[in-house]
Image (cartoon, rainbow, N blue to C red):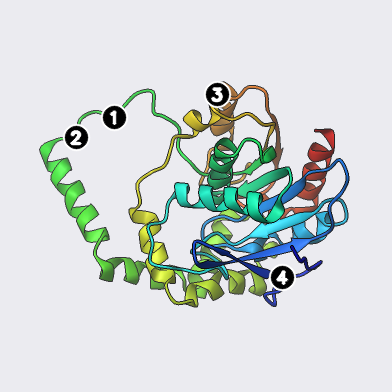
Amino acid sequence: MPSTVITDTTSGSGEYWQWRDQSIHYVHAGTPQAQRPALLLVHGFGASTDHWRKNISGLQADFEVWAIDLLGFGRSAKPQWEYNGDLWRDQLGDFMAQVIQRPTVLAGNSLGGYGALAAAVHCPTLVAGLILLNSAGSFTDPTPPPEPSLSQKIRGQLQRSLVRQPWVSRLIFHWTRRRSTIRRVLKQVYLDHGAITDQLVEDIYRPSCSPGAAEVFASVFKSAAGEKVDVLLGQLQCPLFLLWGEGDPWVDCRSRSAKFHQYYPNLTESFLQAGHCPHDEVPDLVNDSIRSWILSL
């Protein structure tokens, strides 16, 4: 496959791969290194390959680095499909098999972490290692919640019905995608507000203007939950490295770490002073951690 060595993806530098008749945007940097796997970076919800620019530039001298826009995000196509973890699992697996074509370390943040975990389980022969950065996905609840009352059931059904209304989801989408809202959310999930630049806000805002973006947003929140993380960990066969931005307000990293250890005790992990997106907030620390761990495999 042709490749483009880059240090900045803001202009849209990259290539496209046709998958299920849809255009998938990706970035390819560096060259294959003997005895070293490739590295595939997978963004979180609402982000894109742009969110990895600091990691691509910091790691491309040591590894062949790939970053991909999941279907429905970034510069990839946004068809009116049902979006869920199985879809992105299959996309990542096919990308490794058809485009990268050699052993790969998957690194995913948030939603991308869950997709990367599912892909690592689904395609074990393609994956040399897995790096999860504040990964999404739920564990099986050992104590199921009590049966709701009749009034609670009715209220829940009404709420779900309301959220499924197209005009409601579109209203929420247009409020969420405003630059001011994006900046406000970033200030909640980044410890270092100096890392929240106008360019970062624009990188998140820009894809939301693409045709189909509102429908993707609605589909993600309507889709059924995927396989539980503990079930996937029970099938995982590759080395696992957890990178935690422990200042994440959305994730209780310490308790979540304990659950990962319970179901996959033979893992490596590191806690960093950062929020939900440590790869962008403290990229040098994350790059050094990724580099050291891959070289130790």
The residue drawn where x is 17% and y is 41% is 152
Question: Closer to the camera: disc 1 or disc 4?
Answer: 4
Which residue bears the numbered disc 3? 263
Q: Which of 261 and 88 is in front in this view?
A: 88
The residue drawn where x is 74% and y is 46% is 102
Q: Where is 178 relative to 62, above or below?
A: below
Spatial distance from mark 2 to mark 3, Cα to Cα?
A: 30 Å
Q: In this view, does 104 lie to the left or right of 226?
A: right
Are dots 1 and 4 in contact, CB under 8 Å? no
Q: Nearer the viewer, residue 250 or 291?
A: 291
Mark closest to the chain's N terminus, 2 or 3: 2
Spatial distance from mark 3 to mark 1, Cα to Cα?
A: 22 Å
Q: Position of residue 3 (x, y in %)?
A: 77, 65
Q: Residue 9 carries which label?
A: 4
Tell me the SS state at disc 1: loop
Amino acid bearing label 2: Pro
Quadrant of the snapshot with the C terminus = top right
The residue drawn where x is 44% and y is 70% is 213
Which residue bears the numbered disc 2? 148
